[in-house]
Image: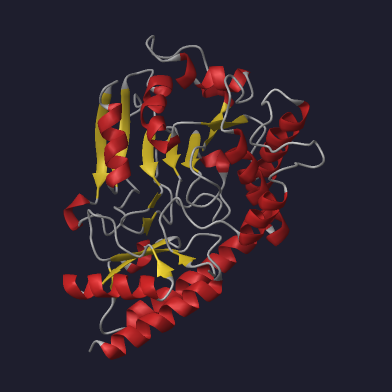
Amino acid sequence: MSRVYNFSAGPAVLPEEVLKEAAEEMLDYKGCGMSVMEMSHRSKVYDNIIKEAEADLRELMNIPDNYYVLFLQGGASQQFSAIPMNLMRNKKAGYIITGQWAKKAAAEAKKYGEVIELASSADKNFSYIPDCSDLPITDDMDYVYICENNTIYGTKYKELPNTKGVDLVADVSSCFLSEPVDVSKYALIYGGVQKNVGPAGVVVVIIRKDLVKDDVMPFTPTMLKYKTQADNDSLYNTPPCYNIYICGKVFKWLKKLGGLEKMKELNEEKAKILYDFLDESEMFKGTVEKEDRSLMNVPFVTGDKDLDAKFVKEAAEAGFVNLKGHRTVGGMRASIYNAMPKEGVVKLVEFMREFEKNNK
């Protein structure tokens, strides 16, 4: 069977050449006689794999030396608690609610301190990014938290909030490595890798070194202390070795492609094909304010639930899979991450055109 076009929001499509390379090395990694899946995380061979992955990521994102790069477990959701436990020293933080994940992060943080909702787009079902130029931020807040790209609702901050000097923390799970980013604007930036970077099971945390201290909430589990992880180069316990190895391959793939500037160009090109069609279509409509559209996640509807279901079913039969929207919004969603080839988007649009013609 040939490969389908996988529009899943995550775990998501990976670059085909990365998968082929991993397949070739499955039984014997570079002549060591075993698979990366089997090797000790304390071995010299693996040490090279994780160190090289970190070096490549630092180069891709131009990460300043005063930031740690940590490869952790527990996915992005575990960071919802790790962040307040490690950073809420005044027991007060501001959260901007632009979707399900920011909402969940805020709910989790409330267990550890006071959470101020600085802005929200819940009034219009998270279909836009609120104005963040003059938020009610106070000096005693430990940080301001955002989810930068909202996987479910398809919105993206085009401009970071004005935090008035307070540290910015951002969940970038679904836009990770999709475009260049100025890491120095964030105190902590993190993302689960299963959307744009690798297989589920790793979360990358990039954190300014001055924030990594022993001074955390007394009940913080050893494993959730950033200091534990930083002091041990992400090897305090057995990390998800194989998944980190795949992430490392994706970093190399991105470098070979020309880095994040080039990736952004390709992503804009792909998104434009789909958004241009949605803007002219009589049947399909995008659900997000134009200026806040994500390059990664594109939700759309026909306005008729039965027609939506018919579309999802027929699309899957034609080889376009995982187009069903998240259960909280319904409709459809095409996630067009880095590894989705342009031809996948072109063919999806051709299929949508045909479907529209046949179902008028």
Residue drawn where x is 25% and y is 66% of the image: 331
Residue placed furthest toward the top? 218
Spot occupied by residue 103 in the image (x, y as percentages of width and height): 27, 40
Residue drawn where x is 20% and y is 50% of the image: 122
The answer to whether residue 195 shows anywhere in this view is yes
Residue drawn where x is 56% and y is 69% of the image: 341
Residue drawn where x is 42% and y is 37% of the image: 76
Of 68 and 53, the residue lying toward us: 53
Spot occupied by residue 215 in the image (x, y as percentages of width and height): 46, 12
Q: Is residue 304 above or below residue 191?
A: below
Of 83 and 200, the residue lying toward us: 200
The answer to whether residue 137 shows anywhere in this view is no
Give the quarter of the image for residue 95: top left
Of 227 and 237, the residue lying toward us: 237
Q: Is residue 199 above or below residue 124?
A: above
Q: Which quadrant of the figure contains the C terminus?
A: bottom left
Q: Is residue 86 left or right of residue 324?
A: right
Give the quarter of the image for residue 289: bottom left
Q: Is residue 94 above or below residue 122?
A: above
Q: Is residue 178 left or right of residue 61?
A: left
Q: How is the image coloured?
A: secondary structure
Count the labels in the image.
Answer: 0
Spot occupied by residue 175 in the image (x, y as percentages of width and height): 48, 52
Residue placed furthest toward the right? 31
Spot occupied by residue 180 in the image (x, y as percentages of width and height): 58, 53
Of 317 and 45, the residue lying toward us: 317
